[in-house]
């Protein structure tokens, strides 16, 4: 734009402002090649104007898992678990922290587990499977605890399979032939562990 045209344009702007009209829109049209929109009729801008992009709002984050260790999870479980025997005469029998299997625990997982036996137990003594949802204690597999060490497997991120052995009629405690398998899954909607499958005949729902 040459100087003569620029001066002529500014004269129009000043005249428009004197008449009470908006000068900014006129300047914007005239100076679109090298100015940005003005805050008033006489503001001259030296840099091209570009709109500031709007950043999308971040979705609300879920409550973070604190990532407690397996040993810390075991401490929580020992405080929460029912005793090995309901009979008060067996109240001196306690769960064993030293012999618990912690390999099934995974911090922040939808469902993971610990296997906890009793102190000074035998092959047929009670053993309990304890579930965790993330860092939260989610209960035991059965009530009461079942005898014999179970076979436990993490089948996917939120499902654990448990197979118990139990003596059938005529079996000795050293060689039980009965088996029962259940799959335990975490349900986000109910906020609970759900079971599907079979239990040993003397077990009850937890």
Image (cartoon, helix red, strand yellow):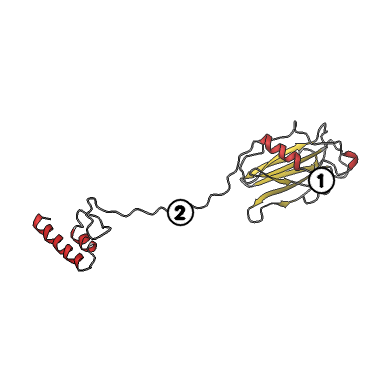
Work out which residue is located at the far left of the displayed protein and give it. Answer: 4
| x and y, in percent, of residue 26 in the image | 20, 63
- Residue assigned mark 2: 57
- Residue assigned mark 1: 144
Residue name at image x 23 percent, y 53 percent: 45
| x and y, in percent, of residue 203 in the image | 81, 48
Work out which residue is located at the far right of the displayed protein and give it. Answer: 89
| x and y, in percent, of residue 91 in the image | 87, 39
The N terminus, quarter of image? bottom left
Please tell me which residue lies in front, 164 or 121.
121
On the picture, is 106 further left or further right than 148?
left
10 Å crowding of disc 2: few (<14), some (14-19), many (20+):
few
Q: How many marks?
A: 2
Residue name at image x 81 percent, y 41 percent: 83
Q: Identify the secondary structure beneath mark 2.
A: loop
Mark in front: 1 vs 2 = 2
Comes first in the chain, label 1 or label 2: 2
């Amino acid at each position: 734009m040459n100087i003569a045209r620029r001066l002529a344009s500014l004269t129009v702007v000043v005249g428009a402002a004197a008449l009470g009209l908006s000068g900014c829109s006129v300047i914007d049209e005239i100076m679109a090649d090298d100015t940005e929109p003005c805050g008033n009729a006489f503001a001259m801008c030296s840099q091209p104007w570009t709109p500031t992009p709007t950043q999308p709002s971040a979705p609300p984050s879920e409550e973070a898992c604190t990532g407690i260790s397996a040993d810390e999870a075991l401490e929580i479980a020992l405080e929460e678990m029912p005793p090995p025997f309901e009979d008060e005469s067996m109240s001196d029998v306690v769960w064993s922290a030293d012999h618990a299997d912690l390999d099934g625990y995974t911090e922040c997982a939808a469902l993971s587990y610990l296997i906890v036996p009793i102190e000074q137990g035998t092959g047929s003594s009670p053993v309990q499977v304890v579930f965790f949802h993330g860092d939260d204690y989610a209960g035991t597999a059965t009530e009461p605890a079942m005898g014999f060490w179970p076979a436990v497997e993490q089948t996917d991120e939120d499902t654990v399979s448990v197979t118990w052995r139990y003596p059938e009629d005529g079996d000795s405690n050293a060689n039980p032939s009965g088996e029962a398998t259940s799959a335990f899954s975490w349900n986000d909607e109910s906020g609970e562990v759900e079971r599907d499958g079979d239990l040993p005949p003397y077990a009850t729902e937890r």
